[in-house]
């Protein structure tokens, strides 16, 4: 140090000093480079929320404090409310406020530490989502009874996927499995799980009918409360509830219970149990077919045995023993009926032949000529009578017609007109019977015995 100071006395140039702002800027840059991504664990104290939405607090380990800030653009992703005394694990970077030369921790991720803190955060998230109705039973969708394609959101290297695949391979070989990989533990696990659920829905919506995912299994194997915390995040619960595909949650062991279990359509105690739920329908079908096949064969064997006994009883029954004698008796009756029918036909044939001979004798040319002559004479007589009656009837009709014409002429209005009378009509065609049916100047028509007269009324005189 002293050597450096002595040497500076002999330097030919004078060093340029930094301004306070420049020095603070250099310090800030050095801090942010050196402490760009640090994890700090401590207890929250002096927690406050500014009007801008930023969170300000301090972290302490009981001996030292460090100021911390979680800006609004970051804290909206933290789905529980921090409070004084809460033990947390924080990830962020060290930065400084240049104007005051104060450094602080800019928080990018905040997680509760310890069973008590996790329980508090769990209850906060649970109460919030329950108040929104996210866990209502009316939202639960039925799990398809016979799924053809199952999606699994979990770690592709974890024990859960191997358990699921083993059970489906053994019990439901017709079920196809689509693995949607996601990190299930750590800071970004919740985000990855929510994204995997959304990706599964997008794939299913655009896929052909036979490739659509029928049900989603979301979960992982057992672990500590911190290990399972990703399935308690609000975004995971919202992704499950927003899924168009029914979701089975399968997180940890049977005693583990997460927010994802509450939001899912069905909770399975373990990933293996979820696989058994999916495979249960196929196993039930196979067992039902096995039982039905056995019942069918038993029924067929019983019916064959019963039919064989019935046939034997029928073969030994009196009707079958007497069957040959009955057949012979029926044959004799048929022969008798045939003989009777032949005799009847021959008799009818002989009668018809005799009638034919008689008719042939009656239809000789001499007999036909005699009958035609008699009919001609009868026809001439009838014709003469018709003509005489027609002439008499015509005379009677003519005399009746003349009488009717004379009576009609006597009653006709025209006959009255021939005696000097007339019929007068106004312009409307009505017959005028008094002077009130016309007016002066009106055109009238007068019918006389031989023709019509058109006139104009000049004067009206009432008798």
Image (cartoon, helix red, strand yellow):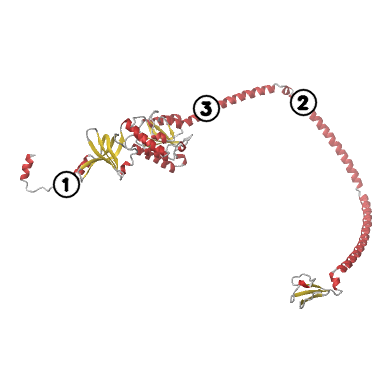
Q: Are marks 1 and 3 in contact (CB under 8 Å)?
A: no
Tell me if I can see residue 168 in this picture. Answer: no
In the rendered image, residue 146, in percent from the top left (x then y), is placed at 48, 34
Tell me if I can see residue 306 in this picture. Answer: yes
Relative to the observer, which residue lies in front, 220 or 69? 69
Crowding near pointer 1: few (<14 within 10 Å), some, many (20+)? few
Kindly identify which residue carries mark 1.
Answer: 20
Does residue 360 appear to the left or right of 233 in the view shown? right
Does residue 179 appear to the left or right of 429 in the view shown? left
Report how far apart the C-alphas of labels 1 and 3 lie in the structure. 88 Å
Kindly identify which residue carries mark 2.
Answer: 328
Does residue 346 appear to the left or right of 437 in the view shown? right
Which numbered tag is attached to residue 244? Answer: none
- What quarter of the picture does the N terminus occupy? top left
Kindly identify which residue carries mark 3.
Answer: 290
- Which residue is outermost to the front? 463
């Amino acid at each position: 140090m002293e050597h450096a100071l002595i040497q500076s006395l002999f330097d030919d140039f004078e060093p340029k000093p930094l301004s306070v702002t420049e020095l603070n800027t250099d310090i800030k840059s050095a801090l942010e480079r050196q402490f760009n991504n640090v994890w700090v664990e401590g207890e929250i104290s002096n927690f406050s929320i500014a009007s801008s939405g930023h969170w300000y607090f301090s972290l302490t380990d009981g001996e030292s404090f460090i100021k911390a800030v979680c800006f609004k653009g970051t804290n909206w992703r933290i789905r529980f409310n921090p409070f004084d005394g809460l033990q947390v694990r924080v990830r962020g970077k060290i930065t400084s406020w240049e104007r005051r030369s104060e450094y602080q921790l800019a928080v990018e991720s905040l997680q509760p530490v310890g069973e008590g803190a996790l329980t508090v955060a769990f209850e906060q998230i649970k109460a919030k989502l329950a108040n929104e109705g996210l866990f209502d039973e009316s939202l639960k969708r039925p799990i398809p009874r016979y799924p053809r394609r199952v999606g699994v959101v979990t770690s592709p290297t974890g024990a859960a996927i191997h358990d699921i695949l083993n059970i489906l391979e053994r019990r439901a070989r017709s079920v196809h499995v689509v693995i949607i990989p996601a990190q299930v533990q750590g800071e970004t696990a919740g985000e990855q799980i929510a994204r995997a659920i959304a990706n599964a829905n997008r794939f299913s919506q655009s896929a052909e009918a036979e490739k659509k995912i029928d049900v989603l299994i979301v979960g992982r194997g057992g672990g500590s409360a911190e290990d399972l915390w990703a399935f308690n995040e609000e975004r995971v619960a919202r992704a499950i509830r927003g899924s168009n595909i029914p979701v089975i949650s399968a997180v940890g062991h049977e005693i583990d219970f997460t927010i994802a279990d509450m939001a899912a359509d069905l909770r399975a105690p373990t990933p293996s149990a979820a696989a058994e739920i999916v495979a249960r329908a196929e196993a039930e079908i196979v067992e039902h077919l096995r039982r039905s096949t056995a019942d069918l064969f038993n029924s067929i064997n019983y019916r064959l045995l019963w039919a064989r006994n019935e046939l034997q009883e029928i073969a030994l029954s009196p009707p079958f023993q007497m069957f040959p004698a009955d057949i012979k008796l029926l044959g004799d009756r048929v022969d008798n009926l045939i003989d009777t029918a032949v005799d009847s036909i021959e008799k009818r044939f002989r009668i018809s032949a005799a009638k034919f001979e008689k008719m042939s004798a009656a239809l000789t040319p001499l007999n036909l000529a005699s009958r035609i002559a008699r009919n001609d004479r009868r026809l001439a007589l009838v014709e003469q009578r018709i003509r005489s009656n027609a002439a008499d009837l015509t005379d009677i009709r003519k005399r009746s017609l003349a009488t009717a014409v004379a009576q009609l002429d006597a009653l006709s209005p025209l006959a009255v007109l021939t005696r000097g009378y007339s019929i007068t009509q106004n312009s409307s065609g009505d017959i005028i019977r008094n002077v009130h049916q016309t007016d002066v100047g009106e055109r009238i028509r007068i019918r006389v015995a031989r023709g019509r007269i058109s006139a104009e009324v000049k004067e009206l005189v009432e008798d």
